[in-house]
Amino acid sequence: MSGVREVLRDLAAQGYDEIITSALADGEQEPFREAGFEVHERLHLLRHDLDGSTGEGRHRSSGRPGVRLRRARRRDRGRVLEVDGEAFSAFWRLDESGPVDALSATPTVRFRVAPSGRSEVRGYAVWGRAGAIAYLQRLAVAPGAQRRGVGTSLVHDGLDWARRRRVDL
C-alpha cells in the first residue's frame, strides 16, 4: 500500500487531482482501496462454451435475417467513432486511437460493420483471438438501430468466426 500512496503523492505534486486505474481483479484491489480508491465502473468478463455441450454451440447462428454485415474498411473508422460516441457514455467512449488499440490488442482480429447505405455504419464489432481464446473486444450499435438485430447479428457473426477456428470464449 505504501507504494500506491507514494505514487498518489507524486501525482498530486504534479498537479493531478484525480486518477483512474485500469481494470483490476479482486485480488489486486486491496492496496488501492486502502489508499482511498473507490469503484468507479465495473468490468464484466463473460464466457461462452462453444464445444456444444450445452446445445448452444451445435448450430450455426447467422444472426437476424436482413442484417447485412461486411468487413470494416479504413474509411469506416470515422463513422465507427461516431457510432461509439452515440452508444457509450463519455467514460467508455473510444478516442481517435481507440479503434487502432482495439485492432492491435490481439494477434488475430475480426472487424465487422453493419452498413446502412453506401457510407453509413449502424453498428460494429471488434473480435480478437490470441491462441485458443477469442474475445469480443468492442461492440456498439447506433441508438437508432438498436433493437433491430444489428447487435445480435454482430455477436453471432463473431461466435461463428470463433467456432470455425475452434477457439474458446
Image (tube, rainbow, N blue to C red):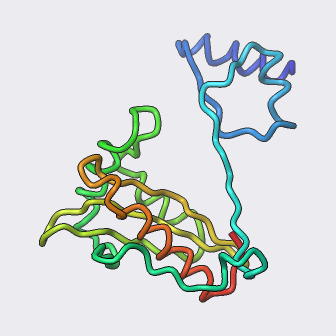
Name the residue rendered at 54%, 59% in the picture: 137
92 sits to left or right of 17 = left
Taking the view exactly as shown, the residue that stands out farthest to the front is 55
- Residue located farthest toward the bottom when viewing the structure as drawn: 164
Which residue is depicted at the point 39% across and 54% down?
Answer: 140
Taking depth in this image into account, of 120 and 4 the one nearest to the observer is 120
Q: Quadrant of the N terminus?
A: top right
Quick check: 89 left or right of 59?
left
Q: Is residue 36 above or below residue 91?
A: above
Q: Residue at x 44, y 65 (%)?
A: 152
Quarter of the figure with residue 71: bottom left
Q: 27 and 148: which one is in front?
A: 148
Q: Is residue 143 above or below residue 29?
A: below
Quarter of the image where the C terminus is located: bottom right
Relative to residue 107, is residue 2 drawn left or right?
Answer: right
Q: Is 121 left or right of 108, judged from the image as shown?
A: left
Instruction: Name which quarter of the figure residue 123 lies in.
Output: bottom left
**Where is residue 115, by image quadrant?**
bottom left
x and y percentages locating residue 84 in the rendered image: 35, 48
Nearer-the-camera pick, 116 or 132: 116
Q: Identify the residue at image location x=60%, y=79%.
A: 162
Q: Give the percent coordinates (x, y) of residue 50.
A: 70, 77
Image mark count = 0
Residue 126 image point, x, y percent = 47, 65
